[in-house]
Image: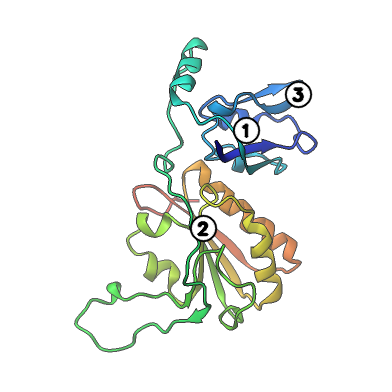
Amino acid sequence: MIRRIIQIDAEKCNGCGACAAACHEGAIAMVDGKARLMRDDYCDGLGDCLPHCPTNAITFVEREAAPYDEAAVKANMKTKGLEYKGRCPGSQARTLSHSCPGQAAKSLQASTAVSSTPASNQSQLRQWPVQIKLAPVKADYFDGAHLLIAADCTAYAYARFHEDFICNKITLIGCPKLDSVDYSEKLTEIIRQNDIKDVVIVRMEVPCCGGLEMAAKKALQQSGKFIPWQVKTLTIDGRIKED
């Protein structure tokens, strides 16, 4: 079957072993000082290892590969005397990404009408689209913008997300696990080609979410601009994690 699976660039691998330690399924092992994918059917294609690689040696590819075999993974872990802990929290369920028909860039105006509805129920979204994959590189709403780069799950985990994060910002969201793209390339061009005032990165505490933070930081560096930025990490029970 054709499916998404990791690929390790041996030239970029520095042999640190962080990816092997991060792989919950034991699909990666160190061979002759380099990380290697040992069996296709041990890799679930979710990429827990990606954010742990300091040299960006691991990427996603779509190729012919045996389907993920959780039973085989459990059996392999048992023979090694290891406990199978399951997949990374936050990646138990997967969906396939599809192209969205609503890709036309547009600005949105937050409602200012007097209403009996509590203010907390008013959307603070200021533009469309919001997915990083669908967003244009250049748009009027980016000029002078305070940019929010957020993981998909954050708005569901944190109850006051619109008020505390989206308000007065241009919002871009993505999930490094489900989108097999390098966000840093588009984010670099967005920051480079527009007058972005500052950047707030909001991610979940789960390891797989580190890929979004890494991509945003890489984009800031590659843009050649000195822009204030900060990272906010949310817990899965909806709190802002202390720095």
Taking the spot 43% from the left edge, 45% from the top edge, the residue there is: 94
In the rendered image, the vertical position of residue 155 relative to residue 11, given as above or below:
below
In the rendered image, the vertical position of residue 160 relative to residue 197, given as above or below:
above
Taking the spot 63% from the left edge, 75% from the top edge, the residue there is: 196
Residue 19 marker: 1
How many numbered marks, from 0 up?
3
Residue marked by disc 3: 33
Residue marked by disc 2: 174
> Could you say whether the residue bearing mark 2 is in a helix, strand or loop?
strand
How far apart are the alpha carbons under marks 2 and 3? 33 Å
Q: Which amino acid does the dot numbered 1 rest on?
A: Cys
Q: Closest to the observer: 190 or 133?
A: 133
Residue at the far front in the pictured view: 1
Q: How far across and how far down the image is residue 112, in percent?
A: 33, 87
How far apart are the alpha carbons under marks 1 and 2? 22 Å
The quarter of the rendered structure image containing the N terminus is top right
Residue at the far right in the pictured view: 11
Residue at the far left in the pictured view: 116
